[in-house]
Amino acid sequence: MDLPIDHCRLLGVSPSATADAIFRALQLRLDHYPNQGFTHEALNQRGELLRKSADLLSRLSSCHRACEMWPPNVSYYHHAAKSSFYVPAEQEIGGLILLWEAHAPQEALRLAVRVLGSFKTPPTESDRVADLALLVALACRDAAREKAEQHCYDTASNLLQDGLRLLQCVGRPIKCCQLLDQELELLRPYQIFDLLSCNPNDRSAHDKALDLLRALIYDYNGSTAEEKVRNSTILDHQEFKLFFQRIRRFLTIQEHINLFQHHYEASAHTGFPAVLALTASGFSRRKPEQLTEALELIHLQAKDGHDALPLIGCLQLLLGDVLKAETSFFSSNDSDLRRWLQEYPNDSLAAMCGYCHSWLSTYVLSEFQDTRAVSVDLEAWFADSDVQAYVNSLDRYLKQSEDQNDYSSTSSIPLKKTLDNVSSKLRVAETKIASGVRKRQQLLSMVAVVLTLSTFGIVDLWLRMTRLDRSTSSSYNSEPLILGKAKDSRSVADSRTGTAIPLMFPPIKPLIADNPSKNQLSQLLQGWLDGKAAILAGLKDDRLAIVAWPALVTSVKSQRGRDATANQSQKIKASINSLEIISRTPLRIEVRAVVNYSDQRLASDGRVLEATPPTTLNLRYILGRNGNLWQLRTYVSNS
């Protein structure tokens, strides 16, 4: 055969090289032979061809120097040095190896396939066929890499698949097939991207990409962390995340959900794309049940060490669970979220809604092919009848599931009863506003917002966060702020001077028991009530950090800041009357408590601005375990 390569390129020397330089290059090539596993006979053929080429070039070089004054000889020399290289049939394996070494893998592959196809019967020369099979594998791999460098990833993958089929027909070494298989796996993410992006309207290419994507997800979820480290063909977490960020915009939401429907529990990292797909689908199609499913899945991220609290908070807010959402937002360590919340120091609800709106528009809906045009309208979401019906039934659903989830409904108050409660509170507010505390128009605007939020059973909490009036705030608290037991309480401020007087509270110990008793839980909750009331009375009390979640502590301190701005304080008396454990797990305890309660709102001069007579409150508390420490995570009205 004639190799499409000249002698200079074959040996790796310049046409103007001297004889000494040619022989040095020859020795270097003989010493550095390919060690991929060729037989001794094939390497000998390679060496013989190198020597012939070096001998020819050295003789032509001597002739050129002797006759360099005669131009026709120079032309002859260049023609001979650059002519194609003829290889006898008995040395064709060596010639193909040299062609592959000269960085011509596609030509070497084409000629090797021609040689294999020349066998009229199954070959019996095992060494020769083994060398040809290895050469096909190496040339096929390098040809595919050349195509990949040109960003023709699908063409490169097809080359590798053709090479695999040829090797299987020859029935030759498994090692060669493994070489191509490994290269094909490395190219698979790029091939998927190539098929999805090059021609979005090509349905066959799109379907082929989806099949490859399913296989990639299956391999990713079926491999342990150690296997991913050992096997470079398996994407690690960061590579997997970046890859899906690139291809997500070429997939519809339903395609995304179908891809991950069997892999939700397999990996936290495949759970995250599923969370985004379910959120986009649920919000755009007004299916809140898909947001509940996304909320369950996203807890995998938290277990994997990621701060998923901002995402959890957004989903809880969309499901009407404002108190839980506030706890999640203020417990997060995300620096961007903290800066966002600091821009709304006195309106956490507006901060949460703004953050949720930004998250949906930037990171969720815009990432999928069929939701890019969907606008984020939270008002329309909350006004949707299907969303209202689902949120209203969420608490009943959670009770039927026996509290298997780590979150619960904000309130168990039926919708009609909630609306009646809101109406009565609004009538009280309107009476006080008529006396000059607020303008009527301001009331009416706030009433409209309250009626919208009340549909989701979260009005009590919303009123506690964004009060209609600072002077009427105590009327809206679903759990009044409490200052210890009545028999132990002293006046918060002297009625003559308005100076805060230190109060004595019993010390509280961190609750670290694995299975706390009712008495221990009662002491923890009483510590929460006493510490919370002390802060609102204007005193410094550090016990809340022991008994309560950081978000609750932040909320109490914010409330005290608003009172201080108005030059007011609160005097509250309360005690735990009775306590009943509803459910208990190693990391979560839910209790129902009856609290004896009364309060007074005092001006800076000690005047009583408002007072609530002694009454009892039915409250539900949820405690969680932070390491070994039990703390109050949230509470809701249980009336």
Image (cartoon, helix red, strand yellow):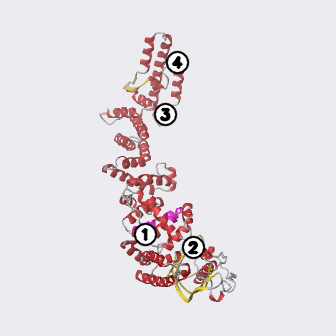
Which residue is the site of mark 1?
A: 292
Q: Earlier in the sequence, mark 1 or mark 2?
A: 1
Q: Is residue 354 above or below residue 167?
A: below
Q: Residues within 10 Å of mark 3 (few under 14, many from 20)?
A: few
Q: Label 3 near label 4: C-beta < 8 Å?
A: no
Q: Closest to the observer: 496 or 551?
A: 496
Label for residue 555? 2
Q: Closest to the observer: 412 or 264?
A: 412
Which amino acid type is marked by label 3?
Pro
Q: CA distance from mark 1 to mark 2?
A: 26 Å
Q: Is residue 142 left or right of residue 593?
A: left
Q: Earlier in the sequence, mark 4 or mark 3?
A: 4
Quadrant in which residue 412 is drawn: bottom left
Image spot of residue 612 (x, y percent): 56, 87
Q: CA distance from mark 2 to mark 4?
A: 88 Å
268 in magenta? no
Q: Secondary structure at mark 3?
A: loop
Tell me the magenta residue range: 289-311
Which residue is the site of mark 3?
A: 34
Which residue is the site of mark 4?
A: 19
Q: CA distance from mark 3 to mark 2?
A: 71 Å
